[in-house]
Each structure stands twice: as structure tokens, then as C-alpha cells.
Amino acid sequence: QKEVEQNSGPLSVPEGAIASLNCTYSDRGSQSFFWYRQYSGKSPELIMFIYSNGDKEDGRFTAQLNKASQYVSLLIRDSQPSDSATYLCAVASGAGSYQLTFGKGTKLSVIP
Amino acid sequence: DVKVTQSSRYLVKRTGEKVFLECVQDMDHENMFWYRQDPGLGLRLIYFSYDVKMKEKGDIPEGYSVSREKKERFSLILESASTNQTSMYLCASTLDRDGYTFGSGTRLTVV
């Protein structure tokens, strides 16, 4: 059974701080990694994806991947109250696989 | 932007009814998925399809079936609804490996 683990939170950070969200996965053959944001009562929306070891930056968001440690993280710089949401980590296993296994999500609260 | 439309936002059905959840995408995506999302359990894959008339079971297919007669439409069928199928149902589609686009979801209550 492929597993994706996240701390459920809630993770509380003050406005303007860096929020760090972490995710581990069990399938060493995993190829693609995704972060989704889900506001309460809404559907998930894609924030970033990463395929290669290292960092990938997009605006205030940075995804970090370490395949040796089976670890992926999301950093949110200059956190805003509008970033308050549940963040879902998702993993696709195997070459050409489009099926995603999701973690249960980490709830982030940004305190003004 | 890709649009994935789920026909109903909220649905209430009786135990034993046959229930159809419809999903339509407008970007010619080949790959479509049905998930359910429950508190504490996260998103779980029910069925998926990589092409017209093609379907594959996900992690929790029991009690469900699907239909894909046209590329843009992927339907989830609850053959005989039960109370443990009360959930948020999310449809998603993708063209390639760059992540899904989700529909707005259908919150189904079975009474």
C-alpha cells in the first residue's frame, strides 16, 4: 500500500513568517510530487509540482524534494492570512503514472 | 483554463437508490478520476479512466461503477446507495503528468 504521510496540524504561524509543510512517502519508485491547497468547503487547487531533487520556486512558494529520504516539503514565505487552508501532498508512482495518492493534509493557520 | 464541471453541488438521496454523479471536462483530457474525501481519511481513489470506454479500479471501488462513453464525460454510479457512501465526491482530469484539475465537488448525503 502506497502511503503519503503529513502532520495534520494545525500549524499556526504569524503573518509574514515562513510556513514549512512536510510530507513523506513510502513508495521509492515515486516520480512526481504535488502540493495542493484546499480552502474549507472548496476543492483542491494545484500550487506546485516537482519531479527532480532539489528546490523549485514559484513566487512565495518553494517546493523541496529529497528522493533519497523520501521527503518533500513546501515553504511559504511571507505568509498571509489568505494562505490559511489545508495543504495536501500528492505523489504519483511509476513512470507515466497519472494516479495520485494523497496525504491527509496539514491545516495551516496564519495569524494576523 | 481547464474547466471540470460536476453537475450537482449538493445531493440528498435515499438508501437503496441508484445515484449518478456526472463530470464533464472541456479540454480534451484523456485521463479522468473519481475520488471521495472524508474527514480523517483524506482523498481516496474510487475509479479512473485513461480513454473512452476504458476504466480501472482505484483503491475503494466497492459499491461503485463508472461510465465513460465520451471523452469529456466521466460518470460515477452508486448502484444502491448506502449511508456509508455519504461523502464529498471529487472528479479530476489531467492531460499529462503535471497534476490534476478538480471539479468543485458534489456533497452527497444518503439518508
Image: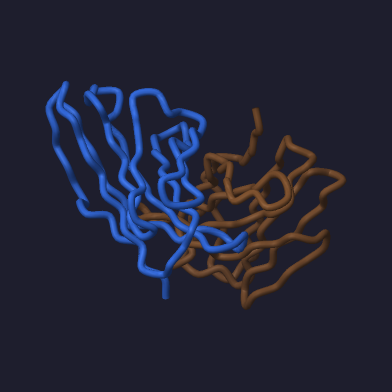
State which chain is coloured brown. Answer: A
Q: Is residue B107 left or right of residue A16?
A: left
Residue B73 x %, y %:
33, 55
Q: In which quarter of the image is residue A26?
A: top right
Q: On the picture, is A89 further left or further right than B30? A: right
Which residue is at the far right?
A68
Instruction: Please name the residue shown 59% across and 51% down the image.
Output: A98
Is A82 in front, or is B1? B1
The quadrant of the rendering that contains the N terminus of chain A is top right
Task: Output the letter for the chain in blue.
Answer: B
Q: Where is residue B19 in the image (x, y as percent from the top left)?
A: 20, 35
- Above or below — where is A96 with respect to B26? above
Q: Residue at x 56, y 68 (%)?
A: A79
Q: List x then y, in percent, for residue B99.
A: 56, 60
Q: Which residue is drawn at 43% across and 28% down?
A: B61
**Does residue B72 lie above or below B13 as drawn?**
below
Res A41 visible:
no
Viewer-proximal residue among B35 and A45: B35
Give the side of residue A24 with respect to residue A66, left or right.
left
